[in-house]
Structures are given as C-alpha cells and as structure tokens.
Image (cartoon, rainbow, N blue to C red):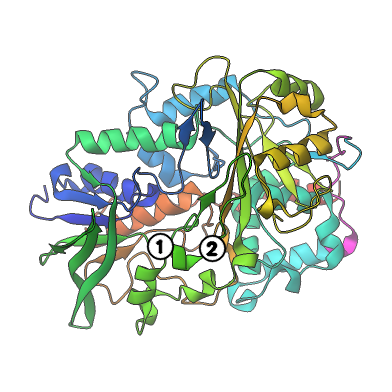
C-alpha cells in the first residue's frame, strides 16, 4: 500500500477520473489520499448530460464506443459496478444492452430529395483509391503537420465514404492528415462496415449517466474527495536534477484564493485543455453566445506551464483558429412520440439501432441520432430525447436563410424538418437547445512533433498530463479511450506499476481485415 502518497488531479474529465481509479485499484493508494479539483458544478468534463424534461435535456456530444478496440476503457469498467443493473459491472451491462440493441443503420445518408442514399458503394475513383492508399502508408514524419487536403484531391470529399467517415468521426478536410491516417489504421475493422455502423456500441443511457456517474460513485465510496466549483489558476514549480516538480497548487474557490501544498513524493495530474472549453448554450429563441478562450480559463494554465518549457507542449497549435475547430450540436426534448414514430418509419430503424442519419447535401452538414429511450436516468415515460450536430454551423441553411450559429432552437428544428420533409407540427411541442463548441475538434488541428506533451514528460518529476492533447503512439484522439489510456499510462509510469497497460489491438495487421478494407474500396 502507498499510504503516504497523495495525488491531486486538476479537472474531473474521464481521464482524471480514470487516473484516480487506477491509482486505487492498481497502486493501492487510499482513496482518501486523492483529491480532484473541478471548475464546473458537476464532474465528467466533456462526457456531460444535464437538464430535465421541463426545461429540456442537454448533451454537448455523444461519444461512440466499440468493444473491439477500447482496451483500456473496458479494462477499467470491468471493475466499476453499474448503478442501474445490480450485480453487473458497467462493461457487463453495456455488453448485454448491445446484444439487445444491435446497431445496423438503414438510413446512414439522406440526399436533398429525402431519398436514402445507396451506401454500399464508397464512390471512389481509381485516383481516390491510390491517394488514400498513399496517405495510409505514409510514415508520420512525412505527414508532419500537413492537412488532409494536402494528400487527397477535391473529388475525394464528394465520395460516399467521406460523407460517412467525416460525420462519424467529425473530420474536416483541413484537419491533420496524420490524425486521419491514425484513424484509418485504428478503425480499419470499421472501414468495411462504415455504412451500417455495426461496430458502434452504445451505453444504456448517455455517457454521463452510464460511465461518469458509476465511476464517481465508486471513487467517492473509496474516499476520494471531488471538489467542485474550484478553479486551479497556477502551479508553483521547482526545478532540480533537470526535473520540474509541482510544489503548490493555486485555487480560486468561492471567490477566495487557496494554496494547496504538494509535498515531496506527491503527484499531480493535469487535464491540459478541453475540447468543450468555452461552450455556450442557446434556447428555442436565442443562439448560443460566441465565446473564445478569453471567456474561459481552460487553456490559460497549460499556456503558463508550456511557456519556455517545450516538453510541456504547444497549446497554440490547437487553440489558434476557432473557425477550423468549432461546430454546433443540439439536444431536442419531446413530449410526444410523433417525431420518433415518423423517423422510425422513414429510416426503418428502431431508435437505438440506427446511429447517425446524415443529410449529405445540407449546407450545415447536419446529422441526427435517435438513441434508445430513455436516454437519461430518471427520464419520465412519454418523454423522448434526440441529439444532432452540424459540422458547418457558419454557413447559410437550406431552409433557414441564416447560419446555424445565429439560430435558436426553433429555426434549427425548421431546418431539420425541411431536410426530412416533415411538417412543423411534428415538432410543435419540442424543446431544442443548441450548443456552440469553439474547440470541439481542436485536437484534430495539424500539429508538429512536440506540440503534444507525453503523458509524463521526460523532464517531469511529479506532473502528468491527461487529456486529448497528449501524445500516445498508435491511438486516436476524440475518443473516450484516448483519455483513459493516457491516464493508465501516466499512473503506471509515475507509480512504477508493473502491470501492463493493455496494448492497442492492431486490427490493421490482420490479413482478413486488410483484405476486407481493400474489397470495400472497390464497391
């Protein structure tokens, strides 16, 4: 037992919550020695879920999971008890749920005429195939900080494959070619079934209720202290023996400054930045506010740490161009079944089995997904919730003559009904809450070596970085797995735990998976 070590975690995203669990489970650190500081009033970071049936539910996003890949995530959640299924772990509950709700999209893409697109063909030309192969085989040094458009011709971005891949993973043409290549390899198993999303797994409820709440409950039962509404503003650092160590943590709590002393041998885990930093919500009648990093302290601490310390990364590579990293989501709460009934009839999918429905000719590049109901723990019978998002919120709509970024929920529903050819009575009683996220794909921005710090930088004495903005070979950002893997790597390295971090499952080395992917490109 490491009874003397204390650990301080800045941020309560899934990465730091996982780090706390790994310290307790695998290093024997007492939960009472672990403190988590969170600036927001609720834990979970980007894996959030809030609201109520009267005022409307809210989800900034919904992460898609897979039981074929997420090695570290399921390693953790096999040992976390479910809150909704007594006697089962979160992993066991999720497996059982997906056996009952098998994903197989029948309406992955919809065109401007409201016809379901034949998605069996990827729409590649021979030039597209050769360029995609060239990109997928290029080494990372050669890809460098290049964009996807540096490797693929304009016609590629009109293919059926791109419409599906881009909206499944939220890629834009100007994003990192290196990250796109990593995705091609990490999810090569999904390449051959991208049109049905058969590899995607869902949790019973939204991920706040199904992942965050059980994990926080387990941590608190072990004695972990979760301090909410507490903003960490600075670290005191000491340099010695070519190592940088945190000796103090400056906090702003309830309007008062506090200094937490970090003793020799104690550990600090820092969530450097957040993809949902500076998010803002709108209403049925009002658009979300246009916030920037000046409206939130999420990037400030990383910028302070990294100044003059290249081993701590380069946040400017990720937070310098909001137009290239933002998109907008919306959550719709319904008090009757009309919309769900019509969507299920149109798509052929029962809610919870269809995945994303993307309107490929939408100026906003809009998609919606109808999850299994109820989607929130405690959601009343007769209330239904669905979520959608648009990758191009600053473009004029097809049915609403203004950008999505200037629209309230009423206008977003009008645009959605236009693409579906549904009359507005279908959503007459709906409450649509839009959410603007200026940095939601900032981790996809082109980057150079060193822009992302290692989970434990080589010059760090007691400080680890856990987020979507650290460097992990072979894995991909914008996934729950990336944060959990970073946490497990950091904890195991700092505490010298001999247990192996579950390796990335390399489906891209399987001859069958490779052959299936090649065959798919010729459909």
Query: What residue appears at the point 78 percent right and 67 percent down from the top-left corner?
Result: 152
Mark identifier at residue 185? none
477 on left or right of 24 = right
Q: Nearer the viewer, residue 323 or 408?
A: 408
For the residues labelled 1 and 2, say whether their Cβ atoms are less than 8 Å apart: no
Query: What residue appears at the point 12 percent right and 56 percent down from the top-left corner?
Result: 5
Determine which residue is flagged by label 2.
443
Magenta stretch: dominant secondary structure: loop
How crowded pointer 2 is (Cα within 10 Å; few <14, some 14-19, many 20+) is rated as many
- Tag 2, which secondary structure? helix
In three-dimensional space, the C-alpha distance between marks 1 and 2, rounded to whole angstroms, equals 14 Å
Mark identifier at residue 298? 1
Task: State yes or no: residue 121 in magenta.
Answer: yes
How many discs appear? 2
Q: Nearer the viewer, residue 454 or 175?
A: 175
Query: What residue appears at the point 62 percent right and 51 percent down from the top-left corner?
Result: 328
Q: What stretch of residues is rendered in magenta?
A: 115-128
Q: Residue furthest left?
A: 4
Q: Quadrant of residue 446?
A: bottom right
Residue 476 spot, x, y in % from top left? 54, 57
- Mark with earlier residue (1, 2): 1
């Amino acid at each position: 037992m490491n009874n003397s070590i204390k650990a301080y975690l800045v941020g309560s995203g899934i990465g730091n919550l996982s780090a706390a669990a790994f310290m307790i489970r695998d290093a024997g650190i007492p939960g009472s020695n672990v403190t988590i500081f969170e600036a927001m009033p609720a834990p979970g970071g980007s894996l959030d879920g809030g609201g109520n049936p009267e005022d409307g539910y809210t989800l900034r996003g919904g992460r898609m999971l897979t039981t074929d890949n997420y090695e570290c995530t399921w390693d953790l959640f096999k040992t976390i008890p479910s809150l909704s299924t007594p006697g089962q772990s979160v992993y066991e509950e999720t497996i059982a749920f997906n056996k009952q709700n098998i994903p197989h999209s029948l309406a992955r893409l919809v065109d401007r005429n409201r016809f379901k697109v034949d998605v069996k063909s990827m729409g590649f030309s021979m030039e597209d195939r050769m360029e995609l192969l060239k990109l997928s085989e290029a080494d990372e040094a050669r890809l460098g900080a290049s964009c996807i458009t540096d490797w693929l011709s304009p016609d590629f971005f009109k293919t059926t494959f791109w419409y599906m891949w881009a909206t499944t993973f939220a890629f834009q043409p100007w994003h990192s070619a290196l990250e796109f290549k990593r995705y091609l390899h990490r999810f090569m198993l999904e390449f051959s079934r991208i049109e049905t999303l058969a590899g995607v797994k869902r949790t019973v409820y939204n991920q706040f209720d199904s992942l965050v709440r059980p994990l926080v409950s387990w941590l608190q039962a072990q004695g972990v202290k979760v301090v909410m509404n507490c903003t960490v503003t600075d670290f005191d650092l000491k340099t010695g023996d070519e190592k940088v160590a945190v000796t103090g943590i400056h906090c702003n709590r309830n309007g008062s400054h506090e200094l937490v002393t970090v003793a020799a041998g104690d550990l600090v885990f820092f969530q450097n930045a957040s993809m949902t930093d500076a998010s803002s919500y709108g209403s049925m009648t009002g658009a979300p506010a246009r916030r920037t990093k000046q409206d939130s302290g999420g990037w400030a601490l990383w910028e302070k740490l990294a100044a003059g310390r290249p081993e701590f990364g380069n946040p400017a590579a990720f937070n310098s161009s909001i137009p290239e990293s933002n998109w907008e989501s919306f959550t719709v709460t319904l008090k009757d079944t009309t919309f769900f009934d019509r969507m299920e009839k149109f798509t052929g999918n029962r809610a919870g089995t269809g995945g994303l429905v993307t309107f490929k000719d939408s100026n906003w590049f809009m998609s919606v997904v109808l999850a299994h109901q109820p989607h929130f723990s405690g959601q009343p019978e007769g209330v239904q919730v669905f979520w959608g998002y648009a990758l191009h919120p600053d473009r004029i709509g097809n049915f609403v003559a203004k950008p999505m970024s200037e629209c309230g929920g009423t206008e977003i529903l009008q645009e959605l009904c236009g693409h579906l050819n549904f009359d507005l009575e279908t959503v007459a009683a709906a409450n649509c809450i839009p959410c603007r996220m200026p940095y939601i794909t900032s981790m996809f921005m082109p980057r150079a070596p060193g822009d992302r710090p290692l989970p434990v930088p080589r010059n760090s004495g007691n400080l680890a970085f856990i987020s979507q903005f650290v460097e992990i070979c072979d894995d991909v950002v914008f996934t729950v797995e990336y944060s959990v893997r970073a946490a497990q790597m950091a904890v195991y390295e700092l505490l010298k735990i001999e247990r192996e971090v579950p390796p990335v499952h390399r489906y891209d080395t399987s001859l069958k998976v490779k052959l299936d992917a090649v065959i798919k490109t010729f459909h």
